[in-house]
């Protein structure tokens, strides 16, 4: 069985589409090799080997080692060096590479193959003693940490002490002699910590490193990352063993990372960072702040760009940028190293980007002829659109804050959004406070994979070190969190739980505001405004609208929500919940009067007070939705929800109604239900108290007539909730039609209206054909339909549903993603039955699932005509509907 794939000398055994087997890194190294790009030779051990390794209780499968040695021999031949040689040793990097990129989550070891003998060979063969010993001390540090489990800090402490001793400002100021001594100290540390000598046999080092990379697949931070990002736990990781090229050989060497387009804005410009005389980890770890790749990226005159420093290498990189973009037809994130002026490519992968960049890149690439409109639509994750709708800082308030001296510093704008929150300095604390409902901003020197849970819990992240590709920046962008990095004037003091900028001290718990679009950090809270939508976004949405079949409406109970929905592209209101109009503070007394009325007379009197209020509500909404359908649902919740609860409320109500408190309490008692969700609610209210629905129908139709007279185009739809039987529906439709006739006669004008039903009781789905005789349309209330089909309380299941998902009993929360096999089948059946009675019947979704991309895909398949989510989900639904069609 083939367990190891070779690449080198312009030819590779693997290719880009073998990611599942070779991991992302391995597959792309192979692809770049085949493209003729300068990639150092290497081998990839497959993810299948990783799986077998775990199945065998953490043992290498038989035959693997032999294949590794054969591969190593090919590398030696290609590069003309020998592994373990005392004259001209081959060194390798050993890196993880999962099928889905998990940045910084798993282990990497560089400079492997060094020992007390080969380090001398390296010094001789390169004529650079300092470099050789620097590589050796880096190797012991990394191997000691990653493979032998010695805390990184212990090595760092020795390094810092050494620097102090000899008066070196930076690592690069240490001499060969200093480094030799440091190596000695490092080895002693290893012995002290583990009781073992640092392994001298390069083959033993290699075996241990491979094992460590496999094991890192199951380290806690990788497990957490997979959980958050929905990455299957059985993928496993590949291991890449690649000939080392050295960015730490001196002033003509360096290492960097770059994006073929700006990952934050999407602009079509080369964008990246590099460090001279450094190895790859130095950039990502955010230890030194890197220099910009290009001239235009420079923000101050004491920076030197790679473009200026290494013009030849830069030109070559520009060409590679072009080759890669043409080939992959997507923005790439690359790693490179310059060894004595010579460029080497160490990685390429599809670059992570903000939503704003994702949209811009997708639209630009269509215009550049690289991809089709359909591909562009598929490239943007609908849920990411949320980010675009992120708030921005209110300009007026910003100016005010600056005038007040509250702008304390500026860092690099790593991920957009403007957020305020309490400062915390540890990931655990961020989680703790977030769980209590607090908004927090995590402030760190830099973040590491150990901080993932805290980053997830925080509103935003602020670091004092690191660049745009540091851990914090990359991870925050992926999560859609606001983030500022490299705010260097901030001095973070973990011990005293505070940070300082000049003489400003910000303590734990103080509120700050960070703007991830500009990098600005403010004291206190600042007003934010809703995001503005770019031209590219509008263009992409236009394409989505051209492609999709599913219509998108909006759930809105107020003119404001209706307006917001319409601005986001909604094609009508799919659900207007009228009870929200009852709940208004000043109306509650009248509503109570209606509910507590003893006689029909009394009730009608109260209703006549409510009628003009409701009519005004509908007029306002019809005006906003001019020309678009508005689906209004008659009263749904059990009446007792409106009743007084506290003693104080009882007394007030009694006073208002001129009745004794005892009387009010008795009436309230009478309305009490053991199981109100299955009690007197929905259309059952309409049957029990027809006057209520009569009033609502009248308010809707009077409003419609009034608007029509004003020249507004009204398309009212009147919807009956919680219908379970066709007789119920027949009765209530008759009532509405009777009211309509009266209203039209009184006002002397007619309006087209429709009467429809919600399908939210399983029985309604089962007898949908009988309902379709009376209902002109169906709207699936998937919240209740899920609740009643599962027999699972929508208000209480949150407490235990997580357990079901964790155990794999349920694939996801059925209130979030539609349960295709159960609830979904009822929807399918009802659509079919409805269509039999009314060909091409109008059917829609008005439950939460109407804004969930995964569910939308299913609704498209079963022939539903529209979905109706809350306003901010409208753009998401439009894009998801287009994706469902493609
Ligand atoms: C539903 O049940 O899915 C629905 C839209 O109605 P409500 O959420 O108001 O019960
Ligand atoms: Mg409902």
Image (tube, rainbow, N blue to C red):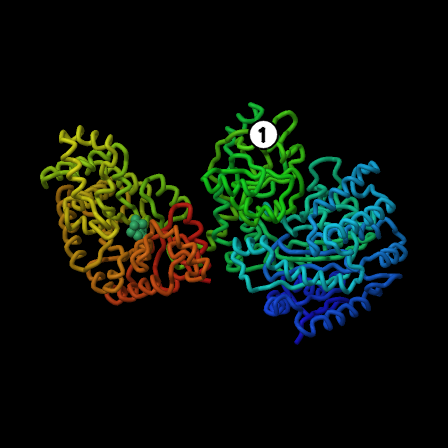
In the picture as drawn, the residue positioned furthest to the top comes out as 404
Q: Is mark 1 within 8 Å of ligand 1?
A: no
Residue at 49% x, 38% y is 439
Q: Would residue 828 be visible to someone looking at this image?
A: yes
Left or right of 470? Residue 814 is left
Residue 422, image x, y percentages: 52, 34
Q: Would residue 844 be visible to someone looking at this image?
A: no
Residue at 24% x, 40% y is 642
Of 668 and 869, nearer the camera is 668
Residue at 81% x, 62% y is 90
Residue 229, image x, y percentages: 53, 55
Residue 310, image x, y percentages: 79, 48
Image quarter in which the N terminus is found: bottom right
Of 133 and 519, nearer the camera is 133
Of 33 and 683, nearer the camera is 683
Total count of labels: 1
Left or right of 372? Residue 252 is right
Q: Which residue is mark 1?
A: 506
Residue 489, image x, y percentages: 67, 32
Left or right of 324? Residue 728 is left
Q: Is residue 464 above or below residue 548?
A: above
In the picture as drawn, the residue positioned furthest to the bottom comes out as 1
Disc 1 is placed on an element classified as: strand
Identify the image quadrant of residue 455.
Answer: top right
Instruction: Say few, some or many: other residues with alpha carbon within 10 Å of mark 1 (under 14 / 14 to 19 / 20 or more).
Output: some
Of 373 and 584, nearer the camera is 584
Identify the image quadrant of residue 640.
Answer: top left
Residue at 24% x, 57% y is 776
């Amino acid at each position: 069985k083939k367990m190891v794939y070779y690449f080198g000398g312009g030819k590779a055994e693997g290719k880009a589409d073998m990611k599942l087997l070779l991991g992302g890194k391995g597959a792309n190294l192979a692809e770049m090799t085949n493209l003729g790009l300068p990639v150092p030779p290497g081998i990839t051990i497959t993810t299948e080997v990783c799986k077998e390794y775990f199945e065998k209780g953490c043992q290498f499968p038989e035959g693997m080692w032999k294949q590794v040695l054969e591969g190593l021999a090919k590398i030696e031949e290609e590069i003309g060096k020998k592994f373990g040689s005392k004259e001209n040793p081959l060194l390798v990097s050993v890196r993880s590479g999962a099928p889905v990129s998990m940045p910084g989550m798993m282990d990497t070891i560089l400079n492997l193959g060094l020992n007390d003998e080969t380090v001398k060979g390296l010094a001789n063969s390169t004529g650079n003693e300092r470099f050789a010993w620097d590589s050796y001390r880096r190797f012991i540090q990394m191997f000691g940490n990653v493979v032998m489990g010695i805390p990184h800090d212990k090595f760092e402490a020795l390094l810092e002490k050494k620097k102090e001793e000899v008066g070196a400002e930076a690592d690069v100021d240490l001499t060969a002699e200093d480094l030799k001594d440091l190596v000695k100290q490092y080895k002693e540390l290893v012995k002290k910590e583990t009781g073992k000598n640092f392994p001298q046999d390069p083959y033993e080092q290699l075996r241990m490193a491979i094992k460590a990379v496999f094991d890192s697949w199951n380290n806690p931070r990788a497990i957490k990352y997979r959980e958050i990002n929905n990455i299957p736990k059985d993928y496993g990781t590949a291991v890449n063993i690649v000939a080392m090229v050295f960015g730490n050989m001196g002033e003509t060497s360096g290492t960097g990372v770059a994006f073929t387009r700006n990952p934050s804005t999407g602009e079509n410009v080369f964008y990246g960072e590099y460090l001279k005389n450094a190895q790859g980890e130095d950039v990502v770890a955010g230890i030194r702040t890197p220099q910009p790749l290009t001239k235009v990226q420079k923000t101050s005159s004491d920076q030197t760009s790679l473009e200026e420093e290494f013009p030849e290498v830069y030109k070559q990189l520009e060409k590679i940028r072009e080759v890669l973009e043409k080939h992959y037809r997507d923005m790439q994130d690359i790693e490179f190293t310059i060894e004595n002026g010579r460029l080497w490519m160490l990685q390429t992968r599809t670059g992570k980007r903000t939503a704003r960049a994702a949209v811009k890149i997708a639209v630009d690439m269509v215009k550049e002829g690289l991809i089709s409109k359909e591909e562009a639509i598929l490239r943007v994750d609908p849920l990411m659109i949320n980010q675009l709708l992120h708030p921005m800082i209110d300009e007026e308030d910003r100016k005010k804050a600056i005038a007040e001296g509250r702008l304390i510093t500026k860092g690099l704008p790593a991920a957009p959004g403007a957020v305020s929150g309490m400062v915390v300095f540890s990931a655990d604390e961020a989680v703790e406070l977030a769980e209590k409902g607090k908004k927090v901003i995590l402030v760190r020197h830099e973040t590491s994979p150990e901080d993932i849970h805290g980053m997830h819990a925080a509103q935003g992240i602020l670091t004092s070190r690191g660049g745009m590709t540091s851990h914090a920046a990359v991870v925050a962008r992926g999560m859609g969190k606001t983030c500022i990095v490299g705010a260097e004037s901030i001095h973070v003091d973990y011990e005293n739980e505070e940070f300082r900028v000049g003489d400003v001290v910000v303590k734990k718990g103080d509120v700050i505001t960070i703007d991830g679009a500009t990098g600005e950090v403010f004291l206190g809270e600042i007003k934010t405004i809703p995001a503005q939508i770019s031209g590219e976004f509008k263009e992409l949405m236009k394409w989505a609208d051209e492609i999709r079949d599913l219509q998108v409406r909006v759930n809105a109970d107020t003119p404001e929500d209706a307006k917001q929905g319409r601005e986001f592209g909604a094609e009508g209101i799919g659900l207007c919940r009228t009870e929200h109009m009852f709940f208004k503070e000043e109306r509650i007394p009248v509503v109570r009067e209606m509910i507590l009325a003893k006689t029909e007379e009394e009730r009608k009197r109260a209703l006549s007070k409510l009628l003009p209020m409701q009519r005004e509500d509908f007029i306002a909404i019809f005006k906003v939705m001019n020309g678009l359908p508005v689906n209004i649902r008659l009263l749904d919740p059990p009446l007792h929800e409106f009743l007084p609860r506290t003693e104080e409320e009882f007394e007030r109500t009694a006073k208002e109604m001129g009745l004794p408190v005892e009387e009010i309490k008795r009436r309230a008692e009478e309305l009490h239900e053991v199981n109100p969700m299955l009690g007197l609610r929905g259309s059952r209210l309409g049957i029990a108290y027809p006057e209520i629905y009569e009033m609502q129908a009248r308010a809707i139709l009077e409003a419609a007539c009034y608007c029509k007279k004003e020249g507004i185009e009204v398309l009212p739809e009147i919807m009956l909730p919680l219908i379970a039987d066709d007789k119920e529906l027949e009765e209530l439709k008759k009532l509405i039609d009777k009211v309509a006739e009266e209203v039209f006669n009184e006002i002397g004008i007619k309006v087209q209206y429709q009467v429809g039903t919600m399908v939210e009781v399983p029985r309604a789905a089962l007898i949908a054909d009988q309902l379709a005789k009376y209902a002109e349309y169906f709207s699936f209330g998937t919240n209740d339909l899920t609740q009643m089909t599962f027999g699972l309380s929508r208000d209480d299941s949150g407490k235990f549903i997580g357990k079901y998902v964790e155990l794999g009993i349920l694939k996801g929360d059925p209130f979030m993603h539609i349960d295709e096999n159960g609830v979904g089948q009822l929807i399918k059946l009802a659509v079919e039955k409805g269509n039999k009675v009314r060909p091409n019947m109008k059917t829609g979704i008005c439950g939460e699932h109407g804004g969930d991309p995964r569910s939308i895909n299913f609704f498209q398949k079963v022939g539903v005509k529209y979905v109706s989510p809350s306003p901010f989900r409208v753009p998401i639904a439009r894009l998801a509907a287009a994706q469902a069609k493609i």
